[in-house]
Image (cartoon, grey):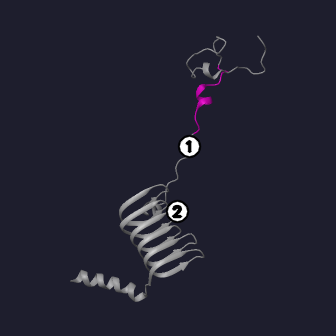
């Protein structure tokens, strides 16, 4: 038997858990010099997931990922991010973001919209509408502020909202509520 510079030899398949009184690969009782299976085979622990801040936890975001198609109505979303395809009879959200390659068809009412993909239908953005260089908007569009990057496309009817139109909607709602 050859002399080894290490005080033990390890065959991972033949090791016994610590305290089991098992023997070393040569058949002799181990003298505590053998490494334990748990120290060699223990998987690394994953880092704990970050705890979202209360503001982030309360934010209602719906993400439609690439390759996903959704049909229906979206209500009360704070932010809707579309990377796939959404066909909706109505979308009401604070923010709409259509990523490059994403498509939305239908009627949408939002505070702000950013279009890098394709929108086809009726879009009302009470605040900002930004059409990125890769974005296309087809159909009827209403917005207060419009920014179109070089390469962005709009085809259809565009109506710019005024401050009077913004004030008119809440006044109408108050009048309906009082009646």
Q: Residue sitting at 58 percent across and 32 percent down? A: 42
How far apart are the two marked residues, 2 and 1, measured between alpha carbons?
Answer: 33 Å
Q: How many labels does the image show?
A: 2
Q: Bounds of the magenta span?
A: 32-44
Category of crowding for the residue at label 1, using alpha-carbon neighbours closer than 10 angstroms: few (below 14), some (14–19), many (at least 20): few
The quadrant of the picture occupied by the C terminus is bottom left
Q: Residue sitting at 51 percent across and 67 percent down? A: 117
Are circles 2 and 1 on residues that touch, CB within 8 Å?
A: no
Category of crowding for the residue at label 2, using alpha-carbon neighbours closer than 10 angstroms: few (below 14), some (14–19), many (at least 20): some
175 or 124, which is in the foreground?
124
In the image, is residue 85 above or below residue 128? Answer: above
Mark 2 or mark 1, earlier in chain: 1
Residue 131 picture location, percent across and down: 53, 74
In the image, is residue 81 above or below residue 42? Answer: below
Q: Residue sitting at 58 percent across and 35 percent down? A: 43
Query: What mark, if any, has residue 46 been given in the picture?
Result: 1
């Amino acid at each position: 038997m050859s002399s080894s510079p290490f005080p033990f030899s390890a065959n991972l398949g033949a090791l016994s858990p610590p305290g089991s009184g098992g023997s070393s690969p040569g058949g002799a009782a181990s003298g505590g010099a053998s490494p334990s299976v748990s120290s060699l085979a223990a998987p690394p622990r994953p880092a704990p997931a970050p705890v979202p801040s209360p503001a982030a936890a309360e934010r209602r975001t719906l993400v439609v990922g690439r390759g996903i198609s959704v049909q229906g109505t979206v209500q009360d979303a704070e932010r809707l991010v579309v990377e796939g395809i959404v066909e909706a009879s109505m979308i009401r959200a604070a923010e709409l973001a259509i990523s490059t390659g994403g498509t939305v068809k239908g009627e949408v009412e939002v505070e702000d919209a950013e279009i890098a993909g394709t929108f086809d239908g009726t879009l009302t953005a009470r605040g900002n509408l930004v059409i990125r260089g890769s974005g296309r908007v087809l159909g009827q569009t209403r917005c207060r502020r419009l920014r179109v990057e070089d390469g962005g496309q709009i085809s259809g009817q565009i109506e710019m909202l005024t401050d009077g139109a913004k004030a008119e909607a809440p006044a109408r709602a108050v009048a309906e509520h009082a009646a």
